[in-house]
Image (spheres, rainbow, N blue to C red):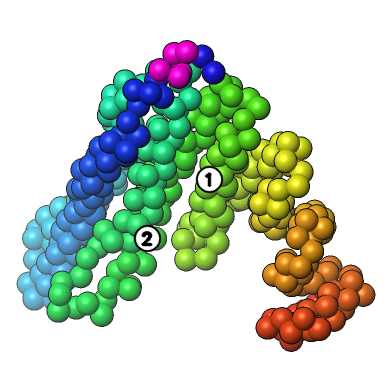
Amino acid sequence: MSTTATHSRIRFNRRAYHEQVGLLVEPVLNRLHRLLSMYVLFNGTFILLGTFEIGLFLSFYALLKTSQALAIILGLFFLTLFSYLVLRLYILAKKPEQLLEVCEQYLRKCRELICYQEGLPEHHIALSGAANKLASALSQKESTLFRPFYFIKSLRPMLEKFSARCHFEDYYRMKEYLYQISIEEHIKVVKCEPTHLEVHAALANAYVRLSSLYATGKAGGEEPASKHYSEEMEEKFRQTAKRAIEEFKILSDYAPNDPWVHVQLAYSYHDLQMPLEEIREYEIILRLKPNDQDTLFKLGCLYFEQGMNAKGLRIYEMLKDSHYQKAASLIKFYGANDLPY
């Protein structure tokens, strides 16, 4: 490492920096809350106005049937609808830029705190940590934009789900941007210290965080509305997970006897639905940790799921003889790959 980088490490007060970054996060969240609340207010105002005009039209139609009044109200309704569609189109085009600008301003302030310099590993690591900190804070705030009044707390779960669904794409893009910044900073560290194992481990974990974001988005409660959007996320997930695997393979080459590396590879192969490669990694872990019953159980499940019943039964006998708690549940996986449907 260069002398400049060494001096930077001496001058750099990591604890003070993290405290200062923590103070920057809350104002960013408040600003995002105000920004998203404005969009909610915009939509709500036009919906209420349109509903009022429709109600007024129906009232005049039922009571007065005055053609002139009906024409004016109908004209106002179409003017409101046209104005809403035009303004909404503009807002939808502008909103992603505004949200990312909020994140970028936060990162600029983080850079200023340490007088950020390219080529200094400590600075790259610090900025990566700041990006991850904001992304984590966004995950916690994602479902709390709509807060019920104290006397209707029973609506809270529904409102949280509604909030997460309405603003899924907004939070997703911000977190994606922050995780990508984190990855870029870790890549810069790798270029400074290409043979440092911890550096490659940090980069691999950065890829895992991003792939987890894509995996969360393409499944379960945060499923995006559009099929195309989901397919795009699936492809991004696969590409990011493959990059994580490549980094773990580098670690495996440098530290072939480290069980943690092979556990991470097994998890990555599981996410990519590559069971044979996952089995290979658990077999390596078992050679390194022969008495690890949890690894034996996972390997036994995989054997049964892939139709390798003889190997699965051998593991079942081993776990049963060692009085492992989950041994009885392992045999339930027997024949999982033999079903005709």
Label 2 crowd (10 A; few <14 / some 14-19 / many >=20): many
Magenta segment's dominant SS is: helix
- Residue at position x 11%, y 55% from top? 72
Whether residue 134 can be seen here:
yes
* Gap in angstroms between the C-alphas marked 2 and 1: 19 Å
> Whole-percent x and y of residue 16?
28, 36
Label 1 crowd (10 A; few <14 / some 14-19 / many >=20): many
Amino acid at the residue labelled 1 = Leu
Element under label 2?
A: helix
- Residue at position x 40%, y 17% from top? 7
Whether residue 83 can be seen here:
no
Residue annotated with mark 1? 210
Does residue 148 sit above or below 249 in this rendering? below
> Whole-percent x and y of residue 42?
20, 51
Q: Quadrant of residue 329?
A: bottom right
Instruction: Classify the position of the N terminus by image quarter.
Output: top right
Does residue 327 sit above or below 263 in this rendering? below
Q: Quadrant of residue 149?
A: bottom left
- Residue at position x 32%, y 67% from top? 160
Amino acid at the residue labelled 2 = Ala
Label 2 vs 1, first from the N-terminus: 2
Does residue 217 sit above or below 15 in this rendering? below
Q: Is residue 335 left or right of residue 157?
A: right
Please name which of the two marks, 2 or 1, marks the residue nearer to the observer.
1
> Whole-percent x and y of residue 65?
11, 70
Where does the magenta region start and end? 3-7
Q: Is residue 56 left or right of residue 302?
A: left
State the mark number for residue 164: 2
Tell me, yes or no, whether the highlighted magenta stretch contains residue 256. no
How many circles with numbers are drawn on the protein?
A: 2
Q: Is residue 141 left or right of residue 251?
A: left
Q: Quadrant of residue 317?
A: bottom right
